[in-house]
Amino acid sequence: MSSYFATTNKQVRRYGVALWAGFLGGNIASFVKWGTENPLPPRTPDRAIPPAEMLRDFGFQVNEMIYTYSGHLVNWGVAGVHHLFSLFFAMFYCFVAEIFPQIKLWQGVAFAILITIVFHGLVLPIGAWAPPIWELPLDELISETFGHIVWMWAIEIFRRDIRNRITHSPDPEYQ
């Protein structure tokens, strides 16, 4: 493909398979992203968690959205926002990959960097849920960028494997 906007042959696209791969990959990749936040916390302890701020702004009682597991309090609201984010963007990515293969640039890394820039550079600051990207500590930029890269790479691994297992054929741009 010579063009960034080149599309695949419509007859070889498998949208249902793509959405299924995105659903499976998005579920697992959600845990991958959470896993990166343990060794590399995404924000300083004095800052609020953006999903919690979003939920509050939408009228939810975020401090009541908890359950106890193994003696730990877990906020299912914040976890749910992250999980739904993962599912939505995984399914979007896999669907779009059926049409525009360039979304898979660097095995999804380019898309991950775009997600980081859009959310931490636009969406979160516009909603007043986080400072603008240029005011974020370097530690947060590293954590979020690395986390999004391994999250999207996990989705790409699922996308390719599930699609190939179900269709028994290569990605649409190779057909």
Image (cartoon, rainbow, N blue to C red):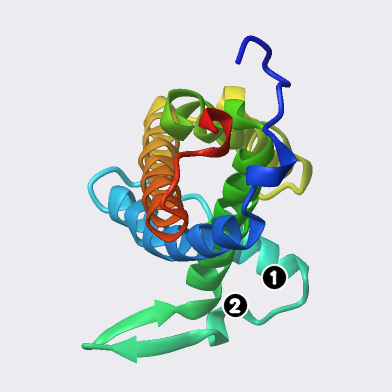
Residue 72 picture location, percent across and down = 28, 82
Write down the quadrant of residue 58 in the picture. bottom right
Write down the quadrant of residue 102 in the picture. top right
Residue displayed at 44% across by 65% down: 24
Say if 172 sits above or below 5 in the image: below
Residue displayed at 34% across by 90% down: 68
Q: Secondary structure at mark 1?
A: helix
Write down the quadrant of residue 77 in the picture. bottom right
**Label 2 belongs to which residue?**
62
Residue 43 is at least partly visible in this image:
no
**In the rendering, which numbered label is found on residue 56?**
1
Q: Secondary structure at mark 2?
A: helix
In three-dimensional space, the C-alpha distance between marks 1 and 2, rounded to whole angstroms, equals: 6 Å
Relative depth, front residue between 19 and 149: 19
Residue displayed at 67% across by 17% down: 4
The amino acid type found where label 1 is placed reads Arg
Residue 48 picture location, percent across and down = 53, 56
Binning the other alpha carbons within 10 Å of mark 1 as few (below 14), some (14 to 19) or many (20 upward) gives few
Tag 1–tag 2 contact (CB < 8 Å): yes
Residue 60 picture location, percent across and down = 70, 79
Residue 106 picture location, percent across and down = 43, 24
Say if 154 sits above or below 26 in the image: above
Relative depth, front residue between 96 and 46: 96
Residue displayed at 73% across by 41% down: 10
Residue 175 is at least partly visible in this image:
yes
